[in-house]
Image (cartoon, grey):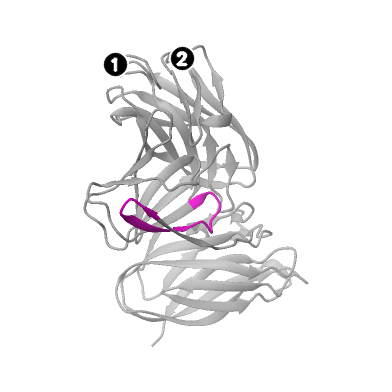
Amino acid sequence: MKSIPGRFLYQITFMILVTIGSTAAELDRSIPGQVRWKISEWPADGRIARPEGIGNISAAYIGQGFVRKALIVEFNKDATVVTLHVPKKAPKNPTLFLELAEKTTQHPDGRIVLSALDSRVVGKKAQLETHPGNHRIGFWANANDYVQWDYKASRWGMYDVELTYSTASPSGTEAVIEIGDKKLPVTLKSTGSWYRYTTIPVGRVYLSKAGKHTVNVKCTRKVGGAVMNLKAVTLRPAPEGNPIIVQSEDSIILNSKDSTVHGVMARYEPDPKKLCIGFWANPGDWASWDFEVKKAGTYNVQVHQGCGKDHGGSEVNVHVGGKTLGFTVKDTGHFQNFIPRDLGTVSFKETGRQRLEIRPVKKAGGAVMDIRQILLLPVE
C-alpha cells in the first residue's frame, strides 16, 4: 500500500558463500522454494540485508533446534533494499529460513504457497502492486473487496494455514480465510509500516480430497484506512494426530497418523483398513515425527512396513538421534500387510525433544511402501 492516509524429487545441493556488509553467511538452496541461511557473524543492530539473487519472499523464519519464529521482512518503496529484522542478541547456532514463491505453487516438500501475484481480486479498490521481489495486494480501502485463488492440490491431508501481510493501520482489523466450507478467523496487528511484513499462524485445515479448492481472504471488520497489504497465504503440511508424541511407557510409539508428510503424493490414509502412510509413488516425499524422550537410553528402531506384490526393493533411510539406519523394503504381498523390521539401535543420552525422519533413497516399484507405525523399543 503506498498512499492511503493514516496509515515459508531429486535435489542438487550447493553452497554459496556470501558477505553482506560485515555479515558472513552460507546459503543452502538444496530445498526448492527455500533458502537456508547460516549466519556466522551476527549483526549488532538486528538487521540483515537480503542476499542478492533472492526472489519474492513469501515468509521468513529464524530456527533454533525445534523452535521456529517468524521474522519481519522490510522493503523500501521499490523493493531494491530488503531488510530482515532479527533478534539483537544472537541465538545459539541460528539459521534463517527464507521461503520463496513468485506465483502460486506447491513445493516438493508439500508447502502450498498462494501468491498475491496471480490471485484474483474481487471488488472496486484493492489491486495488485508489484516490484521484483515484492508482490502484494494493496489499496484495500474497501472492506467488501476480497482476494481469491482457485488451486488444485495434489493430495489430501492436514495443513497449517499462515498469512503473510503488512499494515500501518491500527491493530484490530479482523479477517477470515475461507478454504471450502472451513472459515479461519484472524485478527491483524499493526506491523508499523505498509512495507514491513510478518507471517502469522491462522489455524489448521483438513483438505478431504485432492483437486480444486477455492481460497478466499475477506475482511470482516476494518480498522484504519485499509485492511492490509496481502503478500501470501501458505498451507504447510501438518500431522493429523499429535504434533508431538510424548513417551508415556518404556516404548515410544510413532503412529502414521501423528506424522507430518512432506511431499506431493504421499499422505496419511484414514481408512480403518489402512491407517498408514500410503500413495508413496514419489520417491522425493518423506515423513517425520517429533517426539519427547522421557527416559534416556538405547532403543531398537522397528518399522512396520507393507508392500504390494512385485513392488519390493526400494531403498529407505531412517534418520534419528544423529544416526542413519538404512533398509530395503520387503515385498509383503499387499501394501496393507504389515511386518515389523528391526533396523538397529539408537541411543539418547538425554531426555527431551527428538525428531525421526524416514526418507526414500531409491524407488524400485510402483510405490515405495506403506508405513503403519515406527516403534522405539528400549534395549534391556
Q: Position of residue 144 (x, y in %)?
A: 46, 14
* Mark 1 neighbour class, 10 Å CA radius: few under 14, some 14 to 19, many 20 or more: few
Residue shown at 61%/71% (left/top)?
305
Circles 2 and 1 in contact, beta carbons < 8 Å: no
Please, what secondary structure does the residue beneath circle 1 have? loop
Is 199 placed above or below 277 here?
above
**Circle count:** 2
Q: Nearer the viewer, residue 185 or 91?
A: 91
Which residue, as the protein is rendered here, is positioned at the far bottom?
380
Q: Position of residue 52 (x, y in %)?
A: 46, 47
Q: Nearer the viewer, residue 43 or 192?
A: 43
Quadrant of the frame with the C terminus = bottom left
Residue shown at 69%/59% (left/top)?
281
In this picture, which residue range is highlighted in magenta? 19-34
Which residue, as the protein is rendered here, is positioned at the far top?
124
Residue shown at 66%/67% (left/top)?
369
Q: Position of residue 127 (x, y in %)?
A: 50, 19
Is 230 placed above or below 12 here?
above
List the residue tagged with mark 2.
144
Q: Nearer the viewer, residue 285 or 300?
A: 285
Quadrant of the frame with the N terminus = top left
Which residue, as the protein is rendered here, is positioned at the far right?
310
**Is residue 28 shown in magenta?**
yes
Is 135 placed above or below 358 here?
above
Q: Nearer the viewer, mark 2 or mark 1?
A: 1
Residue 63 horizontal side relative to residue 144, left or right: left
Say which amino acid is labelled 1: Gly
List the residue tagged with mark 1.
6
Q: Earlier in the sequence, mark 2 or mark 1?
A: 1
Say which amino acid is labelled 2: Asn
Q: Position of residue 163 (x, y in %)?
A: 43, 36
